[in-house]
Image (tube, helix red, strand yellow):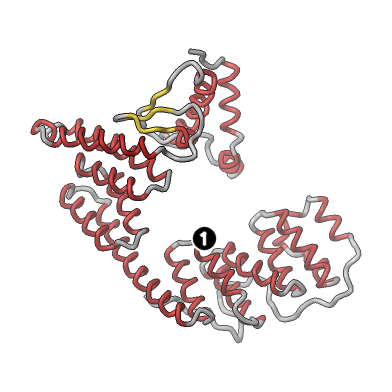
Amino acid sequence: MVCVSNDELVACWEEYQHRPEVLARLQSGGPVLRPGSNDVFDINGIVAQKIFEKNKKDHTFYIEQSVPIQWMYPYLLPSGLIFKLNPEPLAALPAAAIEEDRKFWDAYSKKLLSDPKFRIDSDAILAFGKLAFWHADLYRWRHLDKEQEYWLKMSLALCPQLQDSVNSLAHLLMDQKRFDEAIAMVQQAESDDPRNEAYGPMLDWLNEARVYGQREQELRVELAKSPYDVQLNLDLARLFQDEGKFPELDDRLRTVAGLTNWSHDGMAEIIQYYVDKVHNPEAAIAFLEARAKIDPKAGELIYSLAALHATLGHKDEALKFLTQAAAVGGTNAVISAGIDPRFASLRGDPRFQALLGAPSATNPPADNLPMVNKPATNPPGTVAPKPAKK
């Protein structure tokens, strides 16, 4: 077995520090290592990968999962209670491996649960419940919902008090709109572990999700009858906002952006709602980008899109749309960008400076679409979109 040298360990530490999420944390004044084990295992994972790559031709590797190490997931194969690391990433888990895993765990869990001593051994029920949970977690990563559910239920059969399994199964059932099953499962977990304070809030969350789910189903039924109804589409978008389903929200806004010839006032309301009221500028960007494709000569709309990207630090996108705004919006777009505080992140960028010094287009700017850095109150003559009915 070939291990890593001291120089390689230093290189692993440097690799960790240069990960984008770590760099961002350090730049914002955060610690290089946060409390808990996750950051430590990120570093351990880098070291483990180096050792694995050096030795995989000559040795077989196994792991008993306790903390997830992200790079390992494509390599993991079920192997009894633990996992084997395949020498190369697997595009999919072989069906035979899944079947063998099921046969093993069915027999092993039956043996454990039939032993009266197992139920009174708190260390044993926790250990085996966690081992089953980590098999469920591999199937989660592989998007094998049926298998994930099977092993989560097995984990809870072995250890009814295992909160990780309760939480994962609640999310899985909720994602499948099986709200009643999820609520019943968490109620049983609360009965099995009445001192666990996590289950009360979890039940509140599931009951709220059930209300959202029912409302979403109602809206989808209505939209099936009237797919081009702007208000129905906006109601569904706001429901996604309330639920925190941001990818679905952005997709819905891209759809609604192309449904009709929007007025500038109508677009301003949408932008203001997502920027000022619910503080989700990414949603406003999704809407504006869709509108920019439909109306590529709407100079002030495209300028607002550039400003939003600049505010979020998306320099390349901000410059792209600012260039487009200058091409169709004339002098005003260039002059405004030079004094607009939303473009502060671009001040030192040579591309931005070159754009400000470039000759402007002669087309006049579009009218009436306000800037998106408005205060939270509604501008005169506009009404904020109403929230979706619960």
Number of residues whose C-alpha sits closer than 10 Å to that of mark 1, classed few (under 14), some (14–19) or many (20 or more): some
The part of the image, by quadrant, that contains residue 138 is top left
Question: Vertically, is 295 above or below 56?
Answer: below
Q: Would residue 352 appear left or right of 175 to someone viewing this image?
A: right
Q: What residue would you read off at disc 1?
A: 247
Depth check, front residue: 23 or 89: 89
Number of labelled discs?
A: 1
Q: Residue furthest front?
A: 96
Name the residue at the bottom extreme.
381
Task: Please state the horizontal and vertical placement of residue 262, each as a whole percent of the image.
Answer: 64, 81
Q: Tell me what residue is drawn at x 57 percent, y 65 percent.
A: 283
Q: Quadrant of residue 275?
A: bottom right
Q: Position of residue 30 (x, y in %)?
A: 54, 41
Q: Farthest residue in the left direction? A: 116
Q: Is residue 151 left or right of residue 19?
A: left
- Dividing the picture into quadrants, the one containing residue 316 is bottom right
The quadrant of the image that shows the C terminus is bottom left
Q: Residue at x 36, y 68 (%)?
A: 213
Please provide percent x and percent y for residue 347.
77, 54
Q: Residue furthest top?
A: 1
Question: What residue is shown at x 60% (from left), y 72% (from top)?
Answer: 271
Identify residue type, mark 1: Pro
Measured from the top left, where is residue 7 in percent x and y?
Answer: 60, 17
Of the pair 248 and 194, the residue shown nearer to us: 248
Say above or below: 349 vs 66.
below
Where 115 sits versus 314, above or below? above
Q: Is residue 344 toward the left or the right of residue 137 in the image? A: right
Q: Of helix, strand and loop, which one carries label 1?
A: helix
